Image (cartoon, rainbow, N blue to C red):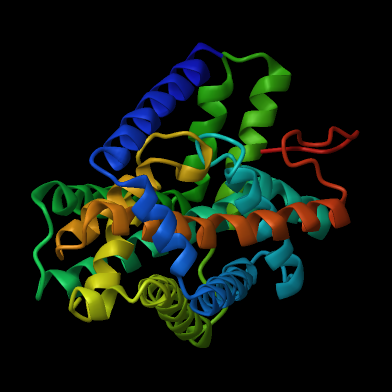
Amino acid sequence: MRKRTLHLAIGAAVTLLCIWLALRGVDLEQVARALAGARYGMVALAVAAMMAAHALRALRWRYLLCPVKRVGTGRLFSALMIGYAANSFLPAHLGELLRAFVIGKKSGIPAGAAFGSIVVERILDVIALIAVMGLVVIVHPFPAWVEASGVLMLAGALALLGLLVLAKRYEARTTALVRYLRNPLPQRMGGRIESLVLNFLHGVQPLAGPGHYLAVGVLSIGIWAGYAAVYYLCLAAFDLPQLHSLPWHAGLVVLVLTTVSVVVPSTPGYVGTFHYLCQVALLMFGVPASEALSYAIVAHAVGILPVTLAGVAAAQIEGIALLRTPAEPGDSAP
């Protein structure tokens, strides 16, 4: 409980700091005029691009889960929306745990196995993000702290991937180690931890065949192309490319910096951190702070509101509580 309270306090402090930084020197009347004059047809297209990227993400998840069990893309998309909506309310990306619980409950997959596939998915995302950063850095250098963050994220992802590969290759030894480590714990708690760890490893599986590896690679490109399209369409909604002669890679720079905001401690929904880093990215291209904040408000809304609404609707249909996992006999939440 103390650790969670500390995390929330740090997140709140970072959020307040970023909100202050984002509002510093901003003309709020100019922000209001920019929001009123935006082309919301472009914003609607950005929403469509975002949801299409999420649909591709659900399809990619189906390939990652195939070695465990075949699950319909529609059911996976529903669980994905529920998890993303929960991330708007819950700290520390706890929506990912809820996503694993939902798909496990509805598809008969151990929640730990479902979470294992989500961890693999996130490793793929980090690699894709670093690839985008590598593409952009050729024509537009990032600040040193962004490059350092990218190196740390890639190192962490590769280290985790290596650990998972070793754990799978030596699964018998991993199982023996887990059982040894849980011996000092009470039997019920130790058994539960052992079950979760082993189910998690069960979810980390090689794909079903070479074609699936190709499909996952193509879908990953499509997902991140969709995210890039969202940022370009939001730029076009405010005519920023024409007004400030923005280069082709401006949207990708914003994409990279705002994705970093997801790993910065903050309150749920990335309020403040997203807006400030969005401003930082656009200030590199000479966009004034007020116009950059207007853009950040709309881009943030495009990323948060549609998935939250879709997730709330899906949760109602599935009978899932977003803020409290339903407790039923036999349920095993991650």
Between residues 171 and 77, which one lies in front from this camera angle?
77
Do we see residue 204 in this rendering? no
Quarter of the image with the N terminus is top right
Q: Residue at x 72, y 49 (%)?
A: 110
Q: Residue 236: percent from the left, percent from the top? A: 37, 78
Between residues 161 and 122, which one lies in front from this camera angle?
122
Q: Is residue 273 left or right of residue 322?
A: left
Residue positioned most to the bottom = 211
Q: Residue at x 74, y 70 (%)?
A: 71
Quarter of the image with the C terminus is top right
Q: Residue 188: percent from the left, percent from the top? A: 73, 21
Q: Residue 324: percent from the left, percent from the top? A: 75, 33
* In the depicted structure, whether residue 210 falls above or below residue 277: below
Q: Residue at x 64, y 44 (%)?
A: 86
* In the depicted structure, whether residue 194 falls above or below residue 27: above
Do we see residue 92 in this rendering? yes
Q: Residue at x 29, y 71 (%)?
A: 251
Q: Is residue 38 left or right of residue 23?
A: right
Between residues 234 and 121, which one lies in front from this camera angle?
234
* In the depicted structure, whether residue 5 falls above or below residue 52: above
Q: Residue 260: percent from the left, percent from the top? A: 32, 51
* In the depicted structure, whether residue 90 falls above or below residue 274: above
Q: Specify the quadrant of the image occupied by residue 59.
A: bottom right
